[in-house]
Image (spheres, helix red, strand yellow):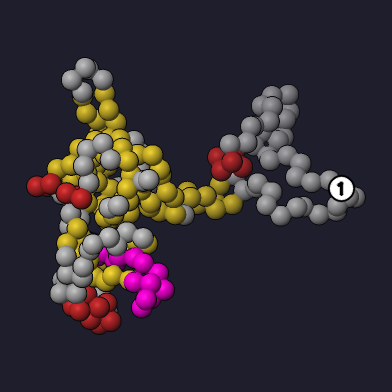
Amino acid sequence: MAAILARKLGMTQRFLDDGRVERVTVLEAGPCPVTAVRTVERDGYEAVQLAFAACKEKVLTKAQLGHLKKADASAHRVVREFRDEAGELLVGETVTVEAFAAGDKVKISGKSKGKGFQGTIKRHNFASGPKSHGSHNVRAPGSIGASATPSRVFKGMKGPGRMGGGRITQRGLTVVDVMGTRNLLLVRGAVPGPRGGVVEVRTDG
């Protein structure tokens, strides 16, 4: 099992030898210093904590800086834990893209783009109403409950509201190429989040 933190740089395409085009997402992955290793005996669970995105010390609090200095790590903006991914890693080591290889299946988690308050057509793919002959319910959601019985709207009904901005995990992605000298990871398909967003990459399976 392997895990690493990465920044999404954007999407591009690669032309294969047989002429086919591959859509890939470019991730700037690591290097990520190991800042803590959680054990069942001491913490009640197994996990490894990685740091990412080097920054100036003035950006962090004294508590954050003290935690990083315990692991002999410089100032990093992002610190995340990966459950059940510790393996043989030790505090002070560094995880790089070399932990992955072309052909590996991975799952990537990140914060999806926030869309704000949206209606049911965009948020839940509802069908629109008739658009002619004086129709007044072109984008209205329609009936959401009965009248006398039960005299209320059931919980969980699909309606308008806040869309996006939540944690999303995309599974079944494949590593296409690993560029160790440039700390780049090319993944076939789309990855959650905007350009510049931080994502978590884990082997899937």
Count the marks. Answer: 1
Secondary structure beneath disc 1? loop
Magenta residues span 39-59
Instruction: Tell me if residue 82 can be seen.
Output: yes
Specify the quadrant that holds the C terminus. top left
Task: Check the image and name the residue furthest to the right.
Answer: 148
Identify the residue under disc 1: 147
Question: Relative to 130, is 116 on the left or the right?
Answer: left
Residue at image point 26% right, 23% down: 21
User: Vertically, is 190 above or below 150?
Assistant: above
Q: Please state which of residues 33 and 141 is positioned toward the viewer in this rendering.
A: 33
Q: In this rendering, is residue 66 above or below 93?
A: below
Image-based side of 62 in relation to 47, left or right: left
Residue 45 sits inside the magenta stretch: yes
Q: Residue at x 23, y 81 (%)?
A: 66
Q: Quadrant of residue 177?
A: top left
Where does residue 104 sit, x and y in percent of width and height?
28, 40
Q: Position of residue 195 (x, y in %)?
A: 30, 47
